[in-house]
Image (spheres, rainbow, N blue to C red):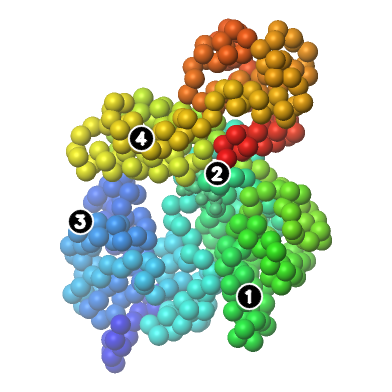
Amino acid sequence: MKTEPGNVPLDAGQLAAPWARVRAKLRAEVGEVEYRNWLRQMVLRGVEGELVAISLPSRFLRDWVRDHYGDRLKALCLPEWPGTRRVDFRVMADAGTDASTQAESGLAESLTPSPRSPAVAASAARVTEAARENEWMAPLDPRLTFDSFVVGKPNEFAHACARRVAERPASAGFNPLFLYGGVGLGKTHLMHSIAWAIREAHPQKPVAYMSAEKFMYRFIGALRGGNTMEFKTQLRSVDILMIDDLQFLIGKDNTQEEFFHTFNALVDAGKQIVVSADKSPNDLSGIEDRLRTRLGGGIVADLHATTYELRLSILQAKVAQAGVDVPVKVLELLAHKIASNVRDLEGALNRLVAHAKLFSRPLTLENVPEVLSDLLRTHEKRITIDDIQRKVAEHYAIRMTDMFSARRARAVARPRQVAMYLAKQLTSRSLPEIGRRFGNRDHTTVMHAVSRIQQLMAEDRVLAEDVTLLRRMLET
Ligand code: ADP
Ligand code: MG
C-alpha cells in the first residue's frame, strides 16, 4: 500500500474493535451457519486511506467471499472507516503477515509475537519485514483444530494428550509430547490443533510449528549464511516448539545435533516440545540414543489405524461441516471400502461431492463405484482373508490350520480373533462370509471377536501394537 501524509495505515490496536463490529454485523445478517462456512476465516490485513484489505486462506474462499459478500462488507466497513472506497480480497499466502491483526481475529501465522509487540503494525513496510522474519515458521491450517478432530478409540489417547498439553503446556510428565502413527492418521491435525488452542488461551506465548525438513533447511541456510546464532536465538525464544515428521532428520547428523541442543535448551527452560514421527522413539532407527532417550522421556502417544466406526464418524462430520447431502449408505460404503487412512477417505468424499455438483445429480450408491472406481479397486483387491490369516498366523507363530480349527486355547483363539477383526476391517466381506472362512463359524462369533479385539486394543498396549503392525504389513 502506498503511504501518503494523512493517509497512514492504522495500527492493529485501532483496527480490532471496528473490525469486530463489522464481523458481528455480517454474522447477524447472514446467520451462524453461513458465517461459519465462509466468513469465519476472514482476516483483516489493514486499512489505509480508501482501501480495506481482507485475506482468506484459499483462492476458492477468497473468490467466494468476494463474489457473494464483497458489497455487504464494503457497506459495513463504511461507517467504521468513512473513507472506504474499495475492499480488497487476498489469499493469505500472498498477503503480508500482520501477526497482531491476525491474533486479534483469532487467526495468525505460526509464530505469534506478543500482540503488543512494538515491531508490528506500525507501518506496511515493517509489517512485511516482520513477515519475512517469521516466515520460516510454517503457517497453520485454519481447518485443523480440535473442533474438527473426530475422536474415536484409535486416537482417543493421542487426542487426550494433545488436549492436555494445549491446556497446560510444559507440565511434568507431558513434555515432550511424542505423537506417532502411519500416514494420514491425524498427527499434523493434532499438532495444528495444539498450536491454535495455545494461541487462543495464551496469546503471549510464542508457538513455533514446522516440519523437520523445514527445520533442516533453515538450519543449513543459517550455517551457510553464517547466522546460526540468530537461528538459535530465535528458536530458543519460543514457548512451544513443534516439529512435525521428525523421521526426516534421520541421517542428517548436523541437523539432528542442532535439534538435540535446541530441544535440551527448551526443555531445561521449562518450554513445551511436541514432536511427531511415523514410528515410536524406540523404532526410529538412525537417531542417536541420547536423542531417543529424551524423545521418549515425556509422553508417547500412538495414533492407531482407523476403525470402521471412526471412519464413519469422520465422514459424517465432514459432510455436516461442508453442508452437503450425502446418503448414509454412501458414507457407509466409503467407510467400509477405504480403510487405509483419513486422507484417502477425505479425498474420496471430496471427489464424490465435486462430481455430484458438477453434474448436478444426487449421490446414490449406484454412482459411487463409477466415480471412485480406481480407489475402490485398489482397496478391495489388495487384501484377502487368506492373506490376513497367513500373516497373523506367522506373526503369532501358530499354524495356519489353527485359523480354522476348533481349538479354544488362548494361544490360538486370540490370534484367530485378531484375524477376524482384521478381516472385518480390511476386506468388504460380510460377517457370515468371514465366519465361513474361519472353519464355518457363526457370524455372531465374528461379531464377538471384533468387539473383543476393539476393547482389548484400548486396554492392552502390546496387542494394540501387534494389530497396528499387522495391519500396516497387510496394507503396504
Ligand atoms: P498425518 O500428519 O498423520 O499424516 P494428517 O493430520 O495430515 O495426517 O491427516 C490427514 C487428513 O485427515 C487431514 O486432512 C486431517 O484433517 C484428516 N484427519 C485425520 N484424522 C482426523 C480425525 N480424527 N478427524 C477429522 N479429520 C481427521
Ligand atoms: Mg503429517
The reply to whether dot 3 and dot 2 touch (C-beta < 8 Å) is: no
In the image, 69: left or right of 59?
A: left
The reply to whether dot 4 and dot 2 touch (C-beta < 8 Å) is: no
The reply to whether dot 3 and dot 4 touch (C-beta < 8 Å) is: no
Check mark 3 vs ligand 1: CB closer than 8 Å? yes or no: no
Q: Residue furthest bottom?
A: 5
Q: Is residue 187 above or below residue 413?
A: below
The reply to whether dot 1 and dot 3 touch (C-beta < 8 Å) is: no
Secondary structure beneath disc 2?
loop
Q: Is residue 20 above or below residue 444?
A: below
Under mark 4, the amino acid is Ser
Tell me, for residue 219, which label it has, or none.
1
Query: Residue 41 location, x and y as percent?
Result: 37, 58
Q: Earlier in the sequence, mark 3 or mark 4?
A: 3
CA gap, disc 3 and disc 2 = 35 Å
Q: Quadrant of residue 271?
A: bottom right
Check mark 2 vs ligand 1: CB closer than 8 Å? yes or no: yes
Q: Earlier in the sequence, mark 4 or mark 1?
A: 1
Residue depicted at 64% across the width and 87% down the height: 226
Residue labelled with disc 2: 185
Query: Can I make out residue 455 in this image?
Result: no
Query: Can I make out residue 385 in this image?
Result: yes
Depth order, front residue of 33/236: 236
Under mark 1, the amino acid is Phe
Secondary structure beneath disc 4?
helix
In the image, 298: left or right of 106?
A: right
Q: Earlier in the sequence, mark 3 or mark 2?
A: 3
Tell me, for residue 68, which label it has, or none.
3
